[in-house]
Image (spheres, rainbow, N blue to C red):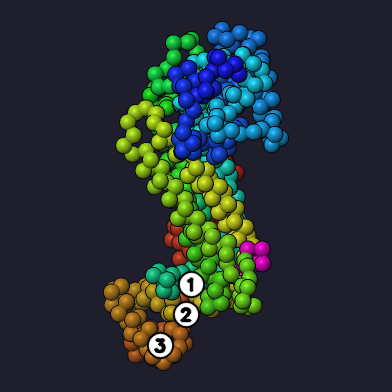
Amino acid sequence: MDETQRPAGNEMWGGRFAAKPAAIMQEINASIDFDKRLYAEDIAGSKAHAAMLAAQGIISAANEAEIQRGLDLVLGEIEAGKFTFSREREDIHMNVEARLAELIGPAAGRLHTARSRNDQVALDFRLHVKRAFQETESALVRLIEAFLDRAEEHAETVMPGFTHLQVAQPVTFGHHCLAYVEMFARDRSRCRDALARLDESPLGAAALAGTPYPIDRHQTAATLGFSNGPTRNSIDSVSDRDFALEYLSTASILATHLSRLAEEIVIWSTPQFGFVRLSDAFSTGSSIMPQKKNPDAAELVRAKAGRITGALVSLLMVMKGLPLAYSKDMQEDKEQVFDAIDSVGLSLAAASGMVRDMTVDRQAMRRAAGHGFSTATDLADWLVREAGLPFREAHHVTGRAVALAESSGVRLEELPLDVLRGLHPGITQGVFDVLSVDASVKSRRSFGGTAPENVRREIAEWRTRLAAK
Ligand code: ARG
């Protein structure tokens, strides 16, 4: 570049600046180290913008052709790893534009007509978050499918259901899997809701006020694949990052669900529970204790929730109190979001892997399901149904039966009939039909209940919903 035209300060705004930034200024100001991740979106945005400028007669067709050719070259260099990213050029927008000028000369100077880095970064970041939402949604579908397959396999597998992590009532493992299907399906629906709101193009808002050039924002929005056209207010377009906050909040809720799943896998895979075994693929050994097999993948998924929610809190704190429109604070939006996107991708992939990979020990689950007098509620319900007791009284009689069984070290169904009749004369042999864990789960056919036939019906329902997209 000619030093007489572009003095020492900066190749983009050297006109007003005589000196270079202090080293520490460059250090705090440059974002290229992380926003280079937006190169594809930045170039796609510039190509759409240049085409529109030419179509509107704002730049010549010849200049546009040069710009398109140059941008393809820049893209090729970056993808081939041959591009030198420079901190002096601050961010991805100026790195691309400066390189374009080196490659094609003066025509490059026309690209930034009717545009600002403010709408440029808003566009690039939106496109990136849009893709992240789409990828998260697909990964969620894969996880849901993994759970549906396991639920199908285990529609009849009995396990203890817990409240307070104390054995509560028997449930089926299939039903437990379907609880996660519901959670992850809601996460998926949150992705879709947010995607619909995000799907507008901020390009053409320029610095904050719009532009005097006769641009066509509907054209660039369509070229860039935004279903809902251009954003409707130039100030808002460059000011808000709520689409990123929606990604992070959706991601935080999703990560919280994953963390609970991970915690259950950690608990289930202890020798004390022994409900599942993770293969070598998702565990590690200990460098000192040869017998150990640790559920590291589950533990890391559990931990990522903290990191992802940290990103949400961090960006909320960056945005609060910012006057409209753009402030440089907003450059601090990207690292957190990028880190969250990567963490969500890894966590979902690891979770799907573990769900598909874990070996379920039916016997261990069944044994545990019978512990802790888990069918006590079934006894109480029987007393209501068959002996006509009010539920409160049935609860009391059952409590005494549990106390008796506990003190004599037997299960509820091992108490002899005459002992049970001593508690209430209305009790007959028929009571033993409901005291087994299988009878218990089979009887819970209320809508949304744990019975194997419900589980099968819900699996079919979810498969239909997934096929409908
Ligand atoms: N690197 C900047 C960012 O990420 C781009 C926008 C700069 N705009 C400005 N007016 N300084 O936010």
Residue under label 2: 371
Find the magenta span and give its range. Answer: 277-282
What residue sits 50% from the left and 60% below the top?
302
> What is the x, y in percent for residue 325?
37, 27
Residue 151 x %, y %? 57, 60
Q: Which residue is drawn at 40% across and 22% down?
A: 208
Quadrant of the rendering where the N terminus is positioned: top right
Decide which of 74, 364 is in the foreground and name it: 74
| Precedes in sequence: disc 3 or disc 1 | 1
Circles 3 and 1, Cβ within 8 Å, touching? The answer is no
The amino acid pointed to by label 2 is His
Disc 3: which residue:
405
Q: Is mark 2 on a helix, strand or loop?
A: helix
Residue at the spot x=55%, y=34% of the render?
Answer: 87
Give the foreground label among 2 and 3. 2
Label 3: state its secondary structure: helix
State if disc 2 and disc 1 touch (CB < 8 Å).
yes
Local crowd at mark 3 within 10 Å, few (<14), some, or many (≥20)? some
Q: Is residue 278 magenta?
A: yes
Query: Distance of mark 2 from mark 3, alpha carbons?
Result: 12 Å
Answer whether residue 7 is visible to the viewer in this image: yes
Report whether the residue tagged 1 is closer than 8 Å to ligand 1.
Answer: no
Specify which label sits upstream in the sequence, 2 or 3. 2
Q: In this view, does 443 lie above or below 102?
A: below
Badge 1 is on which residue? 160
Q: How crowded is mark 1: few (under 14 residues within 10 Å), some or many (20 or more)?
A: many
